[in-house]
Amino acid sequence: AMRYTECKMMPLSMEMVRDIDEETVDFQDNYDGRNQEPTVLPARFPNLLVNGSAGIAVGMATNIPPHNLR
């Protein structure tokens, strides 16, 4: 269900998409129509290209290094 796909971003993550308020992407209603959400998340920094990843589509067949700074 779509209600399981929402998350709250940490302040550092918000810095990576800070230009999102400048109409850089389209927005759509969320699953219940209460909020607007971006159709894509444009990043200022290409994490997957810099940190690398290997594998295919699903999580159990993909190897992506963690990005948790703690």
Image (cartoon, helix red, strand yellow):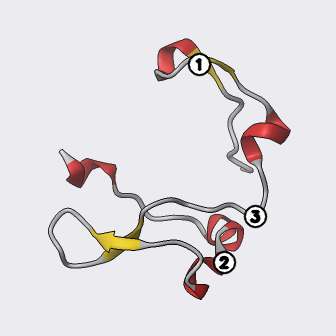
In this rendering, the answer to whether 69 lies above or below 30 is above
All told, the count of numbered labels is 3
Q: Quick one: label 3 or label 1, which is nearer the N terminus?
A: 3
Rounded to the nearest whole Å, what is the CA distance between mark 1 and mark 2? 28 Å
Residue where numbered disc 3 is placed: 44
Q: Quadrant of the N terminus?
A: top left
- The percent coordinates of residue 62 (x first, y second) are 59, 19
Q: Secondary structure at mark 2?
A: helix
Q: Secondary structure at mark 3?
A: loop
Which numbered dot is residue 18?
2
Rounded to the nearest whole Å, what is the CA distance between mark 2 and mark 3? 8 Å
- The percent coordinates of residue 17 (x first, y second) are 64, 70
Query: What's under tag 1, amino acid-wise?
Result: Thr
Q: Going 50% across and 59% down the picture, which residue do you hit? A: 40
- The percent coordinates of residue 48 (x first, y second) are 73, 39
Local crowd size for mark 1, using a 10 Å CA cut-off: few (<14), some (14–19), many (≥20): few
Rounded to the nearest whole Å, what is the CA distance between mark 3 and mark 1? 23 Å
Q: Quick one: label 1 or label 2, which is nearer the N terminus?
A: 2
Q: Are marks 2 and 3 in contact (CB under 8 Å)?
A: yes
Which numbered dot is residue 62?
1
- The percent coordinates of residue 21 (x first, y second) are 56, 85
Query: What's under tag 3, amino acid-wise?
Result: Arg
22 vs 51, nearest the viewer:
22
Horizontally, residue 58 falls left or right of residue 56, namely left
Q: Going 28% across and 78% down the picture, which residue do you hit? A: 35
